[in-house]
Amino acid sequence: MKARIPNQGMSQANMMKKIQQMQEDMTKLQEELENAEYSASAGGGAVDVTVTGKHQIQSIKLQPEIVDKEDIEMLEDLIIAATNEAMKKADETMDTEMGKVTGGLGGLNIPGLM
């Protein structure tokens, strides 16, 4: 006598539909997040950088009082700090939002899932 496994409530066809819908949702969300803008500042707001989710710099705003011919290195450091923070925000938002869609399935190495 063979043991029967009770129907777990989701057929293979339904599972594939759910996975396809998840892939579509992820693609749409990824596009939205890549086109979104993320801003960060450094030096108490002296430097403000805005990047897209694709890590493209959209703008750099400098407060006039921060521009000092005698201390260009500080200005360079502030620009780098603000840029890195804006990119970090973009990455964290991407990870968080994609995690909501995949529900932690990204680690399963299913093609099309991140």
Image (tube, grey):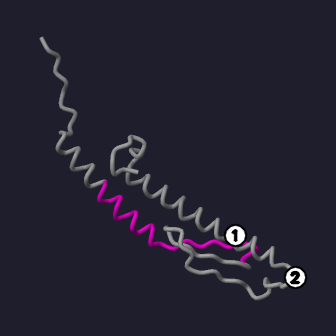
Residue flagged by tag 1: what amino acid is it? Ile
Toward which corner of the image does residue 85 lie, by quadrant?
Answer: bottom right
Q: Residue at x 76, y 73 (%)?
A: 43
Secondary structure under badge 1?
Answer: helix
Residue occupied by mark 2:
70
Residue occupied by mark 1:
80
Q: Residue at x 38, y 40 (%)?
A: 108
Measured as percent of width and height from the top left, residue 2 is found at 14, 15
Seen from this angle, which residue lies furthest left? 1
Q: Neighbour class for label 1 at 10 Å: few (<14), some, many (≥20)?
A: some
The answer to whether residue 20 is left or right of residue 99 is left
Residue in the foreground of this view, choosing between 100 and 52: 52
Q: Neighbour class for label 2 at 10 Å: few (<14), some, many (≥20)?
A: few
Toward which corner of the image does residue 29 lie, by quadrant?
Answer: bottom left
Measured as percent of width and height from the top left, residue 13 is found at 17, 44
Seen from this angle, which residue lies furthest right? 70
The answer to whether residue 69 is left or right of residue 101 is right
The magenta stretch spans residue 8 = no
The answer to whether residue 90 is left or right of residue 79 is left
Between the residue at mark 2 and the residue at mark 1, the CA separation in whole angstroms equals 18 Å
The answer to whether residue 112 is left or right of residue 39 is left
Q: State which region is magenta.
A: 23-45
The magenta stretch spans residue 27 = yes
Q: Residue at x 68, y 73 (%)?
A: 41
Residue in the foreground of this view, choosing between 8 and 51: 51
- In the picture, which quadrant includes the N terminus? top left
